[in-house]
Image (cartoon, grey):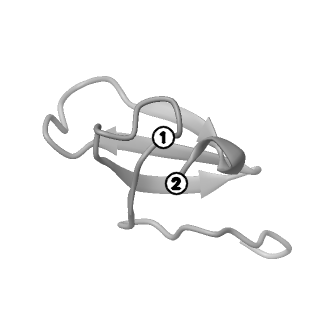
Amino acid sequence: MEGQESKFKPGDTVYTKANPEVKLIVRLYYRRIYYCTFAEDPKKKEVVFFERELL
């Protein structure tokens, strides 16, 4: 997406600052929000985060 610089790219493994033991996979970065799936359980409901919440 033009004009959007993101720290993480789709497919990257990330962790949240609040729960760093849970592994997440970035599915989409859109309008400064990361849409992530759970690495251990991809069928689980997707979660969303701002960049500042991720490691």
Residue ID at (29%, 39%): 21
Tell me residue 19's x, y (percent). 41, 31
Query: For mark 2, what is the residue?
Result: 55
- Going by the image, does 8 lie left or right of 47? right
Q: Are marks 2 and 1 in contact (CB under 8 Å)?
A: yes
Q: Residue at x 52, y 54 (%)?
A: 55
**The residue positioned farthest toward the left in the image shown:** 40
User: In the drawing, what numbered circle is on residue 16?
Assistant: 1
* 48 relative position to 39: left or right: right
Q: Earlier in the sequence, mark 2 or mark 1?
A: 1
Identify residue type, mark 2. Leu
The quarter holding residue 13 reads bottom left
Image side of residue 39 versus residue 8, left or right: left
Disc 2 versus disc 1: distance between alpha carbons? Answer: 6 Å
Residue, x 42% and y 55% (percent of image)?
26
Q: Secondary structure at mark 2?
A: loop
Q: Can you give x and y, in whole percent of width and height, for residue 37 in the image?
A: 33, 41
Q: Quadrant location of the N terminus?
A: bottom right
Mark 2 nearby-residue class (10 Å; few <14, some 14–19, many ≥20): few
Q: Is residue 50 above or below residue 25?
A: above
SS assignment at label 1: loop
